[in-house]
Structures are given as C-alpha cells and as structure tokens.
Image (cartoon, helix red, strand yellow):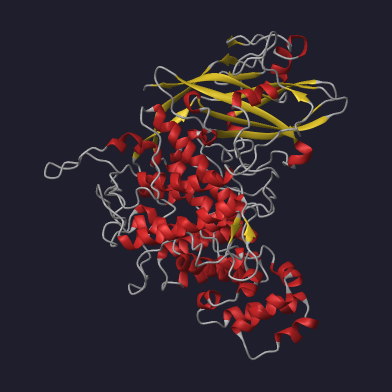
C-alpha cells in the first residue's frame, strides 16, 4: 500500500503531465484538445470525476481508494490530457478524501502557461505593437489566471457528484434512483429493489453498475433529467455567482484600464457581432498549443445568427420575467436562474429549455477561440488562459450587460433593515459625502511582528478620542501604524519555477479601520461591507469593486474600532500570496469545514492608480448580521467567491447594495443611511 506522501508525489506528477498535454501514452486518434466550454467535453470531464470518486470510495482504506482513483486517471489515455487534468482537479476540490492529495498549483506545475506573450519579434518578422499591449501584465498575471481557472473547477456547469455516497444512497429520490440504475441495467426491477434495499446495498449496486459500463460518459449523456439530477447537482447560487464573479473581474479590469489612460471595455455584443474585431492576440512562443488571432477577424455568419437568436431569448426572458421550460409553466427570472441560462448550466439540473438557452456564454467562448476560419485553438477555449485575450473582457462586458439589464428592472433596495449602528459622515456640522472621519486607512508596513493592532488602535483612536478626527501621519499610541489618505502600488519581479522572470503588480500593505457606535441597548451583530470605485465612475454601480465583508458584534451602547488588514479581506484568496514564484499549496485537510481555495489575488486587490495619484471612493455599509447569516471569518479561501463549502455564506444578493439601481445617488444614499458612510482616497503608482 503506498504512503500518502507517495500518492501525493504521484498525483503531482500525473496532474502536471496531463495539464501540460505531455502524456506520452496519449492515443493520437483521440480529440487533441479539451474545450471546457464545450458541453460534451465538460460532461466527459465530470463523468471521469465521478468515476474517480467512486473508485476512491470503494476501497477500505483512504490510501487504497486514492491509488485506485489515480490508476483510473492514468489509464484514460483515450481522453485528451487536459480533460484528465480537469477531472483530477475537480476530484481533489470536491471529493473530501481526495483533498489529501493537494492538487499542485498550476503556476508551479506548468509555469510556461504564464509566460509573457509579447516579445520584440525577429528581424524578419518584427512584432507590431497594439494598443492593448499596455494591459498585458494584468491579463497575463499568474494569480489572476489561476483564480479564473480554479473558479470553474469549483463551479462546474455540468454538475457536482455527491459529497458522501452513503448519505446520497439514503436520501436520494427513489424514482430518480430507479431511473439512474435502469439506465445502466434495464433488465432489473429497480423500484422493487429500492423498497427494501439498505443504503449500503444501493450504494454498492450503483458502484458495481458504473464499473460495468464500457462508456460511463455515454451513459451520463443519455440520462433522463430525473436520473441526472439524482446523481448531480449545481453548487449553491452557482448561476448568480457566475455573473457576480465575472462582473467583479470586469470592474477591476476597467479600473486598471482607466489607471493607464485607456477607455473602459467596449462590449462585444449584438451591435458589433458582425463587425471586424480590431483586437488581436498572440499567446506567444511559450504557448504553442494555442493559436494566435490576427487583427480584424470576423465571426462567421452562422455564429452571428446563433448568437442573435440566443440573445433574443434572454432579452425576452428579462422583459417578461419568465424563463422557458421544455414542459410545464415558465420559471421566474432571478439572478441565479439568469446566470444558469446565460452560462450553460446543465438543463437537466436547471429545468430550463436547452434549445432556448444553450449557454450563450460558453458557446461564445468557443466561437471566438475558433477564429480564424473555424480553425483556431485560441486561448478562449481554456479557463486556464482565457483571460489573457482582450476579447475575453469584451465578451464578458456583453455577458455583464445581460445581468445589468435584469438588475435594472428591479426596485431599489429601501435599506430600511439597517442595524442600529452609526458610522458618521462628519463629526460636526451638516453631513457631507466622502469625508467620513470613521473610515481610516492605515499603512501597516511598519507594524512590529507580534503587535496587536486592534488593541493599539482601540486605545489610540477610540475611547476618549472616539469623537476626534484622525490626522494623516503616525498614530500616537499605535507604534508602527500610520494613517494615510493615499495607498500605493508598484511593479515587482518574481521568478517562476522554471526560472523565467515576470513582472507583476502588487501594493504596499494597508488596513481599513472603521469606527462604529451601537445606538441600541443590546449587543448588535453587523456585517461590515466595503467597496471601492474610481471617483470619476462612482456614479456607475457596476464599477464598484468589493473589498471585504466581515461579521462583528458591537457591545450594547458601545463604541468599537474595527481593524481589517488587507490580507484578511473577504475577496482575497487565503492565505494571501505576494509572489507567484513561491506559491503555497493547500493544507490538504479533508475535514476542514472551511475548505476552499478560491479568491481574488492579494496582489491585485487594488487598481494600479497613477504616478500622480488617482482619486477613488470608498464606501462602507453595515448590514444586520441576523438577516445576512454571514459566517464568522475562518479559513475559507474567500467568503465572496467561495464554493467548495455547502452554502454561500450570505443571504443577500451578491454585491449588495450595488446589485440594483439606487433610488437616489450613491452619495445621497450613504448620507441617508446611518450605518453607512464614504470617504475619498488616492491610489498612487510608484514607478520602479
């Protein structure tokens, strides 16, 4: 029996080999490239994940089960190597015993995927610069690309297998189980079997039937909806988070563009699907398996016609408030169902009509990746490297507009359920926007190791001086902490595991400090939510980037000084990483209830800003934690982007309150709501 360390070494080598497409025994007659955005390819990957989970569960020991699962993955030389890698990644992410294997980080395993694409060219073929070159460092950032890759592993649109097979066998719908078992063996009377069978007998029978299938993926493709949803499920609020996560990426990319004097992204949507695409993208010599796309390529008319039809169906659903089902009454539109219809969530799980909503997002990825002339294998086909291409962002601007169009049909939040706490807009005189004395930014670069910043600040700017302004500069009584009106970013170099040096964005460490007073005579639990946006675009709710949300209880009638360092912000992947050349693997604890490896890169938490300083707005909104049901901060990768846990840890709409139009201007809203406030700040990019 192999040891766990031997299994981890084997898993690391196998994953690296398959992800890089270097499988020496790969059957050359099989499809040469895996397209995650193709529903058949994705279904095949999920089928292999299910088989690996079953192989693991059949063994009497954890080590024996993981060995069997790896044997299975290694044997599938009939499948594209990248498909096997995706299946392994989902296996480790979602199958609890497999978390011990600790999937290797892509930036460490296959660093060439994160090589800069632009070179100087050659004397014979010099490269022609493009206007988009200036954003290459951001689109090709290793951490940003890993984030996008991993999110799609956590939220597979084809579905997730059960977390516990015995619990599944005990609780699954019996009609669905009969249909599932009957799809693999139509000669047996499964309804009668299920009347008296124990959960163990049901589980083991299902396992035996799966192992007897010569092509389990084909069986899955033929399952009826009731059978399919008995075996698979979508993650909690998966459709909503699909839209929200990508919209947040887009807001950050837009902010980065503004920092560099570029305009915001122009959507690649119905008005220009027939037009030439001026942006080109060549992934460079280190990604030879992906083809370049030259300037001014055009979608074929066949693709334009399909996109137009699918767009019209989504627009009609937003207008009517109903999504079409193949049978029965329509399903009311909400953010979750709209995301499912837009991406490509399996129709057998959503109940929506697949012909009407086949997944315009996913098919658009593949159409753009196929340019030119339907012969391309561009980066848009791969979640690992898709965001490198400027067209990714134009495509997602269109997808975001679908979401925004629906949100605009909703009534503004009245925000009447705010908690009885106060974050002041001004210490004296009439309220003014964007000058809150209770929102303090603190440079933490000088904080001594082992110091307690919360205790220091509670004494230094709370207590007897709670009603005094906090002047910029070193904070008396809080050694190593300095109040600032300006945050700073810079470019830095890192050496990847293959020795190549890349230059990437980062920022100097800081913390957000919020002074809050409880006006109630009872302790009050609140969720503190913070967002940032470029000052010039602060009137556009889609430009607000989430920074943090956390739970805290304020004593009855008391005052609190809340300290939140940037590395603990809820959008950030935990633990925070600053160097893609020395990334950390997961802990591999299968029993960690907070297990998750999602999150936005710490290094890209802030937009770049400008050398002369760019003005931003910061908004903090405190909501009633008894309504939010936000969990205390733990080891989860990101409370804002998590998905490996069972339930999304916030009952409010994602991005609240920026997920709907405001009845008044944002500034007026913040002044009206006593538990919310805003301030201005500057982000300066330090040239190095």
User: How many marks can you see?
Assistant: 0
Q: Residue furthest front?
A: 320
Q: Residue furthest bottom?
A: 187
- Which residue appears at 44% of the width and 18% of the height? 613
Front residue of this view, candidates 462 and 113: 462
In this rendering, position of residue 291 left or right of residue 351: left
Front residue of this view, candidates 487 and 247: 247
- Which residue appears at 60% of the width and 23% of the height? 667
**Residue 76 drawn above or below residue 487:** below
- Which residue appears at 70% of the width and 85% of the height? 190
Q: Is residue 401 visible?
A: yes
Residue 291 image offset from top left, x and y in percent: 28, 55
**Residue 5 drawn above or below residue 254:** below
Residue 109 image offset from top left, x and y in percent: 43, 51
Q: Identify the image quadrant of the N terminus.
A: bottom right
Q: Identify the image quadrant of the C terminus.
A: top left
Quadrant assignment, res 55 = bottom right
**Residue 436 drawn above or below residue 502:** above
Q: Is residue 585 visible?
A: no
Residue 292 image offset from top left, x and y in percent: 27, 52
In this rendering, position of residue 459 left or right of residue 605: right
Residue 660 image offset from top left, x and y in percent: 61, 39
Q: Residue furthest left?
A: 124
**Residue 537 drawn above or below residue 26:** above
Quadrant assignment, res 306 = bottom left
In this rendering, position of residue 615 left or right of residue 288: right
């Amino acid at each position: 029996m192999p040891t766990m360390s031997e299994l981890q070494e084997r898993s690391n080598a196998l994953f690296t080999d398959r992800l890089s497409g270097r499988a020496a025994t790969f059957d050359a007659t099989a499809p040469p490239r895996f397209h995650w955005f193709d529903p058949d390819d994705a279904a095949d990957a999920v089928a292999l994940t299910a088989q690996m989970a079953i192989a693991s569960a059949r063994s009497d020991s954890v080590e024996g089960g993981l060995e069997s699962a790896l044997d299975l993955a290694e044997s599938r030389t009939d499948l594209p190597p990248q498909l096997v890698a995706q299946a392994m990644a989902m296996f480790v992410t979602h199958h609890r015993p497999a978390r011990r294997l600790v999937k290797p980080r892509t930036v460490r395993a296959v660093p060439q995927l994160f090589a800069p694409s632009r070179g100087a060219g050659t004397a014979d073929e010099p490269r022609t610069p493009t206007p988009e070159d200036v954003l290459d460092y951001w689109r090709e950032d290793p951490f940003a690309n890993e984030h996008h890759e991993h999110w799609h592993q956590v939220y597979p649109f084809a579905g997730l297998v059960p977390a516990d097979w015995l619990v599944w066998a005990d609780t699954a719908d019996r009609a669905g189980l009969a249909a599932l078992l009957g799809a693999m063996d139509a000669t047996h009377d499964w309804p009668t079997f299920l009347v008296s069978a124990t959960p163990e007998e049901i589980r083991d029978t299902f396992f035996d039937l799966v192992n007897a299938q010569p092509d389990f993926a084909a069986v899955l493709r033929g399952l009826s909806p009731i059978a399919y949803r008995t075996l698979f499920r979508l993650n909690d609020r998966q459709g909503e988070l699909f839209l929200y996560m990508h919209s947040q990426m887009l807001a950050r990319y837009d902010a980065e563009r503004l920092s560099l004097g570029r305009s915001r992204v122009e959507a690649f949507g119905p008005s220009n699907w027939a037009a030439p695409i001026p942006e080109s993208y060549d992934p460079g010599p280190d990604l030879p398996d992906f083809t370049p796309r030259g300037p001014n390529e055009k979608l074929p008319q066949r693709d334009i016609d399909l996109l137009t039809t699918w767009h019209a169906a989504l627009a009609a659903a937003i207008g009517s408030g109903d999504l079409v089902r193949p049978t029965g009454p329509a399903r009311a539109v909400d953010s979750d169902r709209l995301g499912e219809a837009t991406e490509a969530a399996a129709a057998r799980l959503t109940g929506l009509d697949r012909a009407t909503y086949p997944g315009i997002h996913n098919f658009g990825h593949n159409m753009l990746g196929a340019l030119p002339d339907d012969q391309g294998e561009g980066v848009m086909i791969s979640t690992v490297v898709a965001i490198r291409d400027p067209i990714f962002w134009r495509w997602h601007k269109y997808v975001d507009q679908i979401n925004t169009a629906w949100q605009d049909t909703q009534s503004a939040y009245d925000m009447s359920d705010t908690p009885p706490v106060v974050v002041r807009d001004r210490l004296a005189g009439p309220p003014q926007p964007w000058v809150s004395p209770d929102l303090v930014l603190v440079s933490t670069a000088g904080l001594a190791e082992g110091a307690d910043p919360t205790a220091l600040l509670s004494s230094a700017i709370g207590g007897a001086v709670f009603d005094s302004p906090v002047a910029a500069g070193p904070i008396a009584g809080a050694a190593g902490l300095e109040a600032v009106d300006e945050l700073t970013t810079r470019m830095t170099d890192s050496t990847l595991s293959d020795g190549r040096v890349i230059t990437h964005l980062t920022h100097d460490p800081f913390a957000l400090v919020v002074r809050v007073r409880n006006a109630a005579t009872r302790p009050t639990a609140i969720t503190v939510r913070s967002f940032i946006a470029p000052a010039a675009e602060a009137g556009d709710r889609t430009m607000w980037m989430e920074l943090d949300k956390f739970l805290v209880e304020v004593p009855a009638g008391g005052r609190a000084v809340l300290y939140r360092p940037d590395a603990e912000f809820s959008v950030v992947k935990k633990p925070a990483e600053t160097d893609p050349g020395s990334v950390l693997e997961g802990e591999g604890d299968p029993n960690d209830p907070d297990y998750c490896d999602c999150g936005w890169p710490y290094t890209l938490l802030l937009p770049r800003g400008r050398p002369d300083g760019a003005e931003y707005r910061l908004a903090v909104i405190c909501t009633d934690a008894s309504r939010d049901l936000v969990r205390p901060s733990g080891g989860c990768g990101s409370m804002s982007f998590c998905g490996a846990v069972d339930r999304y840890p916030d009952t409010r709409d994602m991005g609240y309150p920026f997920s709907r139009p405001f009845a008044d201007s944002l500034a007026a809203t913040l002044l009206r709501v006593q538990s919310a406030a805003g301030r201005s700040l500057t982000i300066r990019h330090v040239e190095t």
